[in-house]
Amino acid sequence: MRWIILDTETTGLDPAQGHRIVEIGAVEVLNRGVTGNHYHTYLNPDRDSDPGALGVHGLTTDFLSDKPRFKEQADEFLKFIEGAELIIHNAPFDLKFLNAELAKVGREPVTEFCSGVTDSLVHAKTLHPGKRNSLDALCERYGVSNAHRALHGALLDSRLLAEVWLAMTRGQDSLMIDTYDEPETESAEARGHQQDALGLPVILPSAEDLLAHEQYLATLDKSVKGSCLWRQFEPGKV
């Protein structure tokens, strides 16, 4: 499972009005692990940014004047995202800009190169209806530090979104949270049926996982000079 967490910065709000991309940042997540592999580029848009957009990203015309143009970076960008599922916060905004840039260089829409696109904003609204679901709000909700985020930046925001996305999609941890508030009178069998209905996958530990767990317990035993609490746990007793 390969995700590319992606963000862009632009000169304004609408490519139909001639606005362009000035920065692309993308982070690779493979099998739910951030690999450290990323794509990042600033782009010369051949125009000024609107004051509102400049206030968001701070990328001035002078700073961008010696940066490559999108046509020079298109192949490298498409190679990086090829075959992956894109995770984008407010995906329609970024997609319309990416597709406009691709059209200018005679390339097909971005969805022709990736396996699909997921809007993390839509997912967040499903999990947290009626709440603020901006990237900053989600960082606060999931304990992801964004203290170093004075201005928006495509690569920085992609890295933050990667952490938030992994927290939002932990699966069992997030989906089962409501079961803790169920009445104590409800039977274990009934709760089991409800959990089965969620269709959550059961992932069994590998031999390597079990060995690592045993080594960790041995370390705990050594630290307490005896048997750690985990070894004393008996299912059904609390």
Image (cartoon, rainbow, N blue to C red):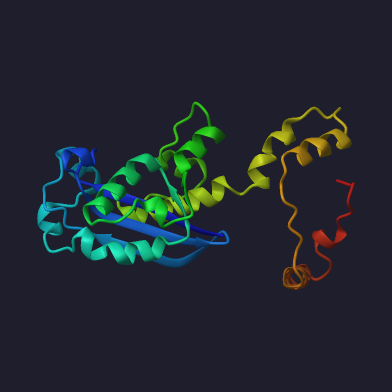
The quadrant in which the N terminus is found is: bottom right
Vertical side of 181 occupied by 140: above or below: below
Q: Nearer the viewer, residue 103 or 185?
A: 103
Whole-percent x, y for residue 81 in the image: 41, 60
Q: Is residue 208 visible?
A: yes
Residue 16 is left or right of residue 115, and the answer is left
At a point 72% along the width and 51% down the height, the residue shown is: 201
In the rendered structure, the answer to whether residue 231 lies left or right of residue 55 reads right
Q: Is residue 214 above or below residue 27?
A: below
Task: State the image coordinates of residue 184 (x, y, percent, origin top left).
Answer: 83, 30
Q: Is residue 157 visible?
A: no
Q: What percent of the width, then of the height, locates residue 141?
A: 50, 40
Residue at (85, 29) in percent of width and height: 186
Seen at 48% across and 50% down, the residue is: 116
Q: Nearer the viewer, residue 57 or 79?
A: 79
Name which quarter of the figure residue 195 lies in. top right
Q: Position of residue 142 (x, y in %)?
A: 52, 44
Residue at image location 18% in from the left, 64% down from the top: 68
Location of residue 229 with respect to 177 vertically, above or below: below
Q: Is residue 18 left or right of residue 136?
A: left
How many numbered marks, from 0 up? 0
Describe residue 184's horizontal placement relative to residue 144 as left or right. Answer: right
Camera-side residue of 214 and 62: 62
